[in-house]
């Protein structure tokens, strides 16, 4: 038969190193060693959890709620030029009813940057949430948007991410596709036009990439004066490209007419672009007036074999000549 020992029995004589008093239901005292071990275990678990959270954030697997005013929508040149009013209204209504279902993608530029986060993809969701916030008279700093922080290794990766999402989610026109290639080249994101096309539109067919390349002519020659470029259909755009390549002066004539009488809607602009604004014909025949001799100086052309550069100088060097040369070079080397 066992006899219970008193709870306050001194045990040092039995165990020379001493034994910590155990926790009992009577005293509720926790052994010091157990307490230390428990604290260490808690710290280890907390550190492990913190590391998991940090890794999830770094790998873009964590959705965060970020202030709307800390999102820079202009971080990248957008491929979307306009947003259909009906589509935006439908998106706003959906977010009001169900909340934001899909996070946007951003890059963290650091605490010193203002705004801190640069938008990669999700422009329409950002615009819709800003509209909702403004209608509710809520400050953008107080409003939140769900976002995933990405860490693209290069600017190329960021542009590819933006284009890929829009190719899946939105109806992007050929003009918008071509424009993002041109703008990416202007920002020196890609080294060559071929690299830009194959990187940004790697998942589209070769024929479609060829059409995007053709539309780049419209962007390069007419982008500053077009008001409704997304309305240009595939067929109309390709036809206009052929006309521009066949007539180096057509670009300048179209620009003059678009600036002189800016169209009020897309239909008017399409009619203007489709019209045959040919150069005035030179009269012929025995009664035709003689053509006056040209008095303007020819541009001076110089070639440097060391640098491989061609320099064209003179009073006749202008934007129209540059675009004509670009069209000729594109046709020659395509």
Image (cartoon, rainbow, N blue to C red):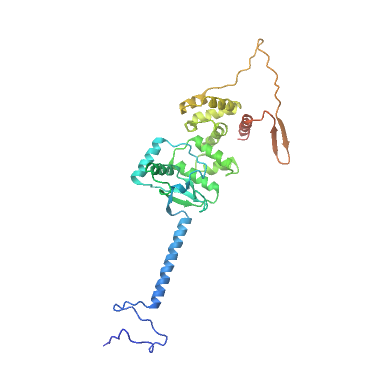
Residue 13 left/right relative to 245: left
Determine whether 284 is above or below 57 in the image: above
Picture coordinates of residue 256, whole percent (x, y): 57, 26
Residue 4 left/right relative to 147: left
**Quarter of the image that includes the N terminus:** bottom left
**Quarter of the image that includes the C terminus:** top right
Near-viewer residue (124 or 303): 124
Picture coordinates of residue 211, whole percent (x, y): 53, 35
Q: Residue at x 48, y 35 (%)?
A: 173
Determine whether 34 is above or below 322 in the image: below
- Looking at the image, the residue that sits furthest to the left is 1
Determine whether 134 is above or below 20 in the image: above
- Looking at the image, the residue that sits furthest to the bottom is 13
- Looking at the image, the residue that sits furthest to the top is 287
Q: How many marks?
A: 0
Picture coordinates of residue 141, whole percent (x, y): 43, 48
Picture coordinates of residue 215, whole percent (x, y): 54, 34
Q: Residue at x 55, y 46 (%)?
A: 156
């Amino acid at each position: 038969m066992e006899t219970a020992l008193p709870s306050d029995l001194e045990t040092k004589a039995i165990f020379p190193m001493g034994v910590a008093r155990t926790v009992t239901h009577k005293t509720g005292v926790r052994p010091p060693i157990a307490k230390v071990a428990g604290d260490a275990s808690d710290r280890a678990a907390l550190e492990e959890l913190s590391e998991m959270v940090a890794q999830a954030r770094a790998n873009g697997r964590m959705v965060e709620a970020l202030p709307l005013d800390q999102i820079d929508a202009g971080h990248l040149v957008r491929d979307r030029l306009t947003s259909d009013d009906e589509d935006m209204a439908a998106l706003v209504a959906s977010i009001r009813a169900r909340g934001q279902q899909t996070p946007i993608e951003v890059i963290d530029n650091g605490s010193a940057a203002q705004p801190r986060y640069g938008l990669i993809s999700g422009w329409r969701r950002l615009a819709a949430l800003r509209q909702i916030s403004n209608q509710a008279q809520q400050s953008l700093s107080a409003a939140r948007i769900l976002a995933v922080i990405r860490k693209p290794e290069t600017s190329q990766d960021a542009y590819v991410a933006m284009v890929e999402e829009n190719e899946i989610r939105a109806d992007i026109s050929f003009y918008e596709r071509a424009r993002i290639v041109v703008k990416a080249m202007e920002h020196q994101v890609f080294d060559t036009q071929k690299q830009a096309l194959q990187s940004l539109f790697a998942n589209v067919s070769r024929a479609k990439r060829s059409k995007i390349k053709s539309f780049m002519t419209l962007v390069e020659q007419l982008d500053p004066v077009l008001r409704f470029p997304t309305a240009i259909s595939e067929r109309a755009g390709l036809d206009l490209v052929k006309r521009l390549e066949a007539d180096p002066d057509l670009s300048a004539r179209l620009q003059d007419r678009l600036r002189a009488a800016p169209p009020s809607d897309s239909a008017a602009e399409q009619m203007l672009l489709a019209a045959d604004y040919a150069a005035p014909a030179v009269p012929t025949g025995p009664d035709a007036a003689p053509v006056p001799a040209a008095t303007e100086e020819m541009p001076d052309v110089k070639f440097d074999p060391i640098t491989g550069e061609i320099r064209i100088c003179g009073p006749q060097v202008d934007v129209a000549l540059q675009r004509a040369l670009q069209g000729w070079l594109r046709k020659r080397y395509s």
